[in-house]
Image: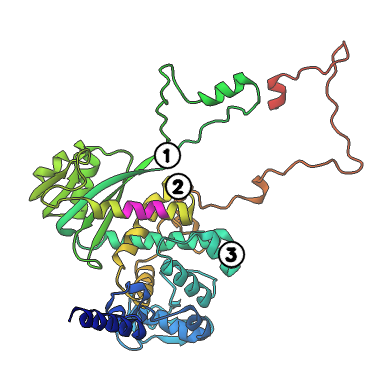
Amino acid sequence: MASSSVIAEIDRALARRNRGPNVSASKKKKRNYLLQPAYRQISLPEIYESSEQELNAFLERIRWNGLGAGMQACPKCGSIDEHYRCPSIGGWKCKGCAKQFTVLSGTRLHGMKMPVKVFLSIAMLFMEAKDGKSSRELSGDHGLDHQTVHVLTLKIREALRETLSAEEPLRGYIQADAAYFMKYVRPGNVGTGAALAAKAVQKNAGLNEEDKPSPVVNASMHALVVFVQAGPQGKRRYRMGLVKTENQVDLLTLSQQFCDKDSVLVTDQHSAYNLFSGEFVDLQRVNHNQEFQTKDGVNTNLAENIFSRIRAAVHGAWHRMSVQNLLEYGWEVAWRQEMVGKNNLFQLEDLLRRLMTSGRPTRFVDYWCKRPEDLRPPKEEIGEIREVPKADVSKKRGRPTKGSARPQKPVSADGKAARVPAEARAA
């Protein structure tokens, strides 16, 4: 009896092996939404194969979809009508103020000379890069100047920041946390000579009298503060703020701006969050020195997750960040987190809608020289994105040309080269 049962079990095992793996079980395994066919609703070949008229109609639908079929809104006077077609500029002429405009007039892309097909290709690649994509890569992919693509991506991030921050405040269960960026200070060179003294200096570089590393803080170091409205994946909402340090006044102001008072906030034990208890329904704390999560399941993992995404983008895509644009980069990652679970066509349309319905740019306004001089912001507010006149660029000194005479150094009475005073060198 026992032998027959053993033989039957062996026969069943052989039959399972001959049938191969359990195909039905592998089909039931849930795949990431990025790998599912439902995610891929649009692709780059579709953009390249479309005509300029089809792509312009795509942008028109995104910008003026809520006005009705064939209707446009004049960016000058605001009149909504079926305006006159103006083929010479590929746009319309307003029936009210007779102002000519295109689908890009009055948007972040006002005055853009880039072909629509190239722009949509950049927007598509920008959207598909889940951890960000550098302007250098985008400029290399499309054969464009780096400055052109860099300003365009900054305009996209600026639109994301302004539109997301203008939405309704966060409500319910909210996690808050802060993280510092640009803390690293590169140590100075100490020499790598073979002498024993030089090796000792190099080994002890950066140590104080107590043989401990001296605390060095980068002057550009700032903190990004994030507020996350908890919920299922794809339903979470994010808000970003930039502060120099985690002091109570800055964080309290940000929380009042981004969060509804009838909310429950979860933070760590930092003293900057002490004032939150009197402003919201409840304040729950997590002592990270002892645990990452309380016994009741309270944690700040959602807030810390977005910081890990930002750091991954810094090291893997952007490679550097500046204080001027740190907040814009943070809002970009916040938007990407809100788009989790959406198909790529929805994400592209959402990106273009925010870019084309949020008005003219506020910081990066005159790169295409389309705004009058009296309406441009001061140069100190534009930031690093500015063009240097060719006459101000210092010329590299090379070998003297044929026939040129080098200036003779002054010689003292003993025949040695005389020392030139500092005043004379400056003159």
Residue 346 position (above or below residue 208): below
Q: Which mark is residue 140?
A: 3
Which SS class for mark 3? Answer: helix
Q: Are the residues at dot 1 and dot 2 in contact (C-beta closer than 8 Å)?
A: yes
The answer to whether residue 77 shows anywhere in this view is no
Q: Residue at x 47, y 55 (%)?
A: 316
Q: Is residue 31 left or right of residue 219?
A: left
Q: CA distance from mark 3 to mark 1?
A: 29 Å
Secondary structure under tag 1 reads loop
Q: Which residue is mark 2?
A: 322
Q: Nearer the viewer, residue 51 or 273?
A: 273
Q: How far, Cα to Cα, is label 2 from label 3?
A: 22 Å
Please state the total of marks drawn on the protein image.
Answer: 3
- The image position of residue 99, as x and y in percent, is 43, 77
Question: SS for tag 2?
Answer: loop
Residue 77, x across and y down, in percent:
35, 73
Residue drawn at x 44%, y 20% as measured from the top left: 208
Q: Position of residue 297 (x, y in %)?
A: 14, 52
The residue where tag 1 is placed is 220
Picture layout, residue 374 above or below residue 22: above
Quadrant holding the C terminus: top right
User: Tag 3: residue type?
Assistant: Gly
Residue 164 visible in rendering: yes
Amino acid type, mark 2: Ser
* Residue 24, quarter of picture: bottom left
**Circle nearer the N terminus (3, 1):** 3
Q: Residues within 10 Å of mark 2 (few under 14, many from 20)?
A: few
Q: Is residue 123 magenta?
A: no
Task: Tell me the magenta residue range.
Answer: 306-312
